[in-house]
Amino acid sequence: MIAEVIVDITNGEVDRIFDYLVPSGMEFLKPGYRVLVPFGKRDIEGYVIGLKERSELDAGKIKPIVKALDETPVILPEMMRLSDFMRAKYNLRRADTLRLFLPSEMRKNRVKELKQYYVTLAPDYIGKDPAQYLKKTAQSQYDAAVYVRDSGGAYLNELNRNFSAAAVRQLRAKNIFLAEETAVLRTPYKHLPGGGAREVALTAAQSFAAETVKGGGFKTFLLHGVTGSGKTEVYLNCISETLEKGKTAIMLVPEISLTPQMFRAFRARFGEGAAILHSGLSAGERFDEWRRLLTGRARAAIGARSAIFAPLQNLGVVVIDEEHDSSYISENNPRYFTHEVAAFRAKENNCPLVLGSATPSVASYYRAKTGEYALLRLPERINKKPMPEMLCVDMRKEMRAGNPGIFSGAFLRELDACMNGGRQAMVFINRRGHSSFVMCRACGYTAKCAACDVSLVYHSEDEILKCHYCDATYHMLSACPECGSPHIRLGNVGTQRAETELRKLYPGVGILRMDNDTTRTKDAHLEILERFSRGEARILVGTQMIAKGHDFPAVTLVGILDADLSLHFTDYKAAERTFQLVTQSAGRAGRQDYAGRVVLQTYAPHHYVYTYARNNNYGDFFKKELNIRETTGFPPFTTIVRAVYSGSDEGEIGKCFSPALAEIEAFARERKDAFLFLRGMRCPVKMIKGDFRFQILMRVRGAETEQIIQNVYAVTGRYKSRGVAAFVELNPPNLH
């Protein structure tokens, strides 16, 4: 028997199937097994993707498999088909797709099943008073024996920690204690509730949405519900019925910060049947949760983007919450769009896919309006509370009135009222750090990263300048390195500066900050959110981590500082992204018993985005934005195709980039109607981590779109070299 194996090397030159002999005793092998195979002068890991009776190669050239690395297959047949789909759709290497289906630490056996010794009393001693079989002087042994008798058993390390290790050792030597090695699960968020939560009675609108989803068969639903409308309960209701039918479920959330909060609801409803998957877990926790899903001990997976690859069979429903979020698009290799992967899995299992959001992406809402998706609406908050009132503050007038600070007078008055009333406030700003750039007032010099074509950000806590692309750090400037001037200007405000200013204004009020800098450690997201939920802090300052999904009953005020930041990006999605951020941030206020207020600070108060956001009018915003997209030829009416070339040597890049551009231009001349735009140029961010960056940017439309994409894949595959990386993006969330 011959096994077809993909070796675990992400290199285009070995991105093909290799034949290996299945040795005697390994006839159990089938597709999905990990194996160790000889490759060159070493043994490396690989994945069995097929079996056949004979090979086209000479028998003498076929080497035998060294060993199987797992007791059972670890890649499901469905995931093998998903690998084929992703390879064709996104031009990915086989090994890159197969790696997605396993915890990364499984490779090279960097994580294994955790085993510990579990101690019980030997049968002859169960239920007896240890005084009957121990000397009176053996007090330590007596205490340990009583503990094991009363508890029914304990792990050896626990006994050694709480009692005399020598006493435990003596009890084992006397065969009074029996120790058996057992597998131990590393469970994330152990303190969260573990089942028994009652199901909430749904409103008429929620019931209609849930029953429609549960109608059966594959279909994509877009659940458009205002913030606080109870979308989560619809999800949980659908998942609950799915599990009752013996099927499984996947639910995705965009931010790791949202995962523990949603997992709390999951575990309360489904107990040990729920598993969590995201990059913030330890290697052991992630491996054990994945293993519980693979073996069927857990049947509902919740997590961020990568949880779409949960090893579940017989899926009954897939849910993507906050479906508009750009984090569902993988911007690094392997590149993929989670919605399309989810749709593949839902179709494979003939089950519904639910996309939920208060601010759906323009592309998704367009598909719903044209009938490709089924549109479901939750137009009111669950408690009939009104949406928060939004006050739009013109910061130009603030400046003219003599207020150069980062907070408007209106925001400070509202914040005073909120604090005096014993309530909580959230302050959103989509930029971490103290200031977004450092500039010399005398000559205009701006501090930039030596390896990336971007401005450095000032972080006041550590007195450093930091690059948010490569994480390089630099000393803060005391004088301009170009002209020597000491007059250094700090640029736009960041979360760190907002926190500092608020601490000065409210010295007796607890203030927390949540951004990438304060959430680097494990469980930091959960700790910050729980402290705020318990009322240990009255003000929470943060980036988009705090802008969506969270439900804090005491929050009555939301301040949105520098709302224009995302509005002025040179990006066709700038208005859409700003509307989503403003609406989602505003939705954190007034969700329970108290009315909510939102103060939005802007230098463009009359922009249509703010007009529609202030009135919570997604419908008219969508019509306006869709008209602009159709007129200018942007998605969803076209597809953006972007081929990016990067490397440390501009000359080497040119040898690949120039002929690739020429070939695509020749191809485009034959299909003028399909190409609305085609140009080769430097990327807006010209360098990242020391690599120069060039792009071929296209906008294409019509029936030939898929053929054009495949042609671009082929061209970029032909024109590359060892020192030049090339990849293709489809409708990328950022064109930096």
Image: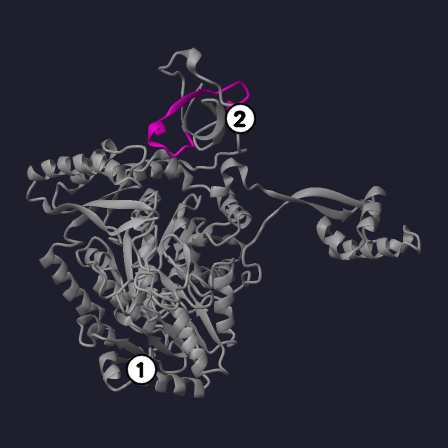
Give the side of residue 681 with respect to residue 27, left or right: left
Characterize the local packing of mark 1: few (<14), some (14-19) or many (20 or more) Cα atoms within 10 angstroms.
many
Element marked by disc 2: strand
| Dominant secondary structure, magenta | loop
The residue indicated by pointer 2 is: 67
Q: Name the side, left or right, on which 626 lies relative to 112.
A: left
Residue 436 occupies quadrant: bottom left
Say which residue appears at 76% left-offset and 52% top-offset: 160
Residue 149 in view here: yes
Q: Is residue 213 left or right of residue 21?
A: left
- Which mark is drawn over residue 408? 1
Q: Look at label 1 and name its amino acid.
A: Ser
Q: How many marks?
A: 2
Distance of mark 2 from mark 1, alpha carbons? Answer: 68 Å
Residue in the foreground of this view, choosing between 396 and 487: 487
| Camera-nearest residue between 258 and 118 | 258
Across and down, in percent, residue 128 comes to 85, 53
Mark seen at residue 679 = none
Disc 2: CA contacts within 10 A as few (<14), some (14-19) or many (>=20): some
Pick whichever, 616 or 301, lies toward us: 616
Comes first in the chain, label 2 or label 1: 2
User: What are the residue bounds of the magenta stretch?
Assistant: 7-28
Asked if residue 215 shows in the view, the reply is no
Residue 34 appears at what percent x and percent y?
Answer: 48, 32
Residue beneath the point at 24% across and 37% down: 651
Q: Compared with residue 140, is residue 508 higher up or lower down, i.e. above or below?
A: below
Residue 23 position, x and y percent, is 51, 19
Looking at the picture, tell me which residue is in the foreground, 707 or 126. 707
